[in-house]
């Protein structure tokens, strides 16, 4: 029978410092600090400051690649704008404008394949697609929506909840297949200023106004919406990132006011984790381990960007206890 001793022996590697390329499970003796150390997988995230937007804004649309070094923000209220900006991991640079200035729109996708839909004020049904350079008007939604939520990709997306043309909250869900819209299952509860993440066939919707600010969370399985575990903190206009089983909601506006609260979702329960540096209603997207919080308000429009990161590895020092 193979044993650890037979494969690795009992010798612990000695290094003058820490390894330049740490590997989970690695144990070594740091001769510089005279300590025994080990490498474990990262599990605790934190927010850090990123480059400010060129134009402060709120209720904009966003998209981000999984690497966190390719982000996109478009539209928003500062007042209503058509301005679009791209993020390269270091700074924001102005790109080509939307065809129509508007706030309260929803966005999804990536920096080079994004979708912008709806907007408040006139509650427009307008949809636009982005190819990394130019915004092109696409097929309009069945009805206009503002302050709704979104999930999915440029070619397969959901737009749900929000305010419809009379200004009433709705439960409507629209599915986009890259060329046309189809109305699918209604949400359980009508709400606006909600947030969402995930895919067109596996999405999460949380928070919003009903008209009171809610902790309600709903899950979509590609066929119907059902209620799932509530948030710990009720709010509206949150940043959002992730998938149906690994996600984040952060920031927002609720009782008693703007919050920096961040909650992590594991597919079953919400856990409060590290707060943002600045409490605000915000926009954002990304993954559970690499997300952006972009702009927002508190109560004026802000240009702040914060980056959420869970490191791949963490170095632990072993001590005698």
Image: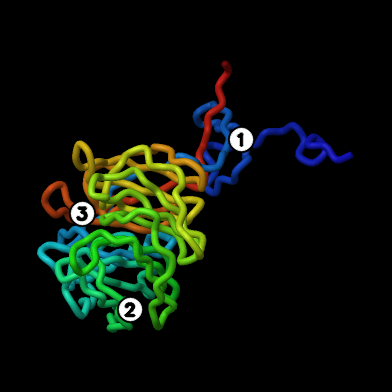
Q: Nearer the viewer, mark 3 or mark 1?
A: 3
Relative to the observer, which residue lies in front, 315 or 146? Answer: 146
Q: Position of residue 309 (x, y in %)?
A: 40, 48
**In terms of sequence position, does the residue under pointer 2 or pointer 1 come before the other?**
1
Compute the Cα span from label 3 to label 1. Answer: 45 Å
Relative to the observer, which residue lies in front, 252 or 218? Answer: 218
Image height of 6 relative to 145, above or below: above
Which image quarter: residue 91?
A: bottom left
Q: Nearer the viewer, mark 2 or mark 1?
A: 2
Would you name the residue on which mark 1 appears?
28
Image height of 96 relative to 241, above or below: below
**In terms of sequence position, does the residue under pointer 2 or pointer 3 come before the other?**
2
Would you name the residue on which mark 3 appears?
296
Q: Position of residue 222 (x, y in %)?
A: 50, 64
Image height of 86 relative to 133, above or below: above
Image quarter (top left, top right, bottom left or bottom right) of the C terminus = top right
Circle 1 packing at 10 Å, graded few (<14), some (14-19), many (20+), is: many
> Residue shown at 20%/42% (left/top)?
258
Image height of 56 relative to 100, above or below: above
Relative to residue 29, is residue 275 drawn left or right? Answer: left
Task: Verify CB contact (< 8 Å) between mark 3 and mark 1.
Answer: no
Would you name the residue on which mark 2 appears?
129
Circle 2 packing at 10 Å, graded few (<14), some (14-19), many (20+), is: many
Image quarter (top left, top right, bottom left or bottom right) of the N terminus = top right
Residue 257 in sight in this render: yes
Compute the Cα span from label 2 to label 3. Answer: 23 Å
Helix, strand or loop at mark 3: strand
> Residue shown at 52%/39% (left/top)?
18
Q: Position of residue 217 (x, y in %)?
A: 40, 48
Helix, strand or loop at mark 1: strand
Q: Position of residue 164 (x, y in %)?
A: 24, 66
Residue 292 in sight in this render: no
């Amino acid at each position: 029978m193979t044993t650890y001793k037979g494969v690795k022996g009992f010798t612990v590697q000695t290094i003058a410092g820490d390894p330049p390329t740490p590997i989970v499970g690695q144990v070594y003796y740091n001769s510089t600090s005279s300590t025994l150390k080990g490498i474990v997988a990262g599990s605790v995230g934190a927010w850090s400051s990123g480059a400010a937007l060129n134009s402060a804004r709120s209720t904009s649309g966003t998209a981000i690649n999984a690497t966190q070094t390719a982000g996109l923000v478009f539209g928003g209220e500062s007042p209503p704008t058509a301005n679009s900006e791209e993020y390269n991991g270091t700074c924001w640079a102005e790109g080509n404008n939307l065809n129509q200035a508007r706030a309260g729109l929803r966005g999804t996708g990536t920096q080079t394949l994004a979708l912008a839909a709806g907007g408040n004020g006139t509650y427009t049904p307008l949809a636009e697609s982005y190819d990394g350079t130019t915004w092109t008007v696409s097929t309009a939604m069945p009805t206009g929506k503002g302050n709704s939520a979104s999930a999915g990709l440029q070619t397969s997306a959901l737009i749900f909840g929000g305010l419809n043309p009379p200004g009433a909250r709705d439960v409507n869900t629209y599915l986009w297949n890259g060329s046309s819209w189809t109305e699918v299952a209604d949400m359980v509860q009508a709400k606006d200023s909600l947030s969402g993440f995930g895919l067109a066939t596996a999405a999460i919707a949380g928070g919003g106004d009903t008209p009171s600010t809610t902790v309600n969370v709903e899950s979509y399985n590609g066929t119907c919406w059902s209620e799932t575990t509530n948030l710990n903190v009720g709010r509206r206009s949150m940043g959002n990132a992730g998938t149906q089983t690994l996600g984040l909601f952060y920031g927002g506006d609720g009782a008693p006011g703007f919050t920096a609260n961040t909650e992590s979702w594991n597919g079953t329960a919400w856990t409060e984790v590290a707060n943002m540096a600045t409490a605000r209603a915000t926009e954002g997207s990304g993954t559970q381990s690499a997300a952006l919080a972009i702009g927002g308000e508190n109560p004026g429009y802000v240009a702040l960007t914060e980056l959420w990161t869970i490191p791949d590895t963490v170095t632990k020092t072993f001590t005698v206890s």
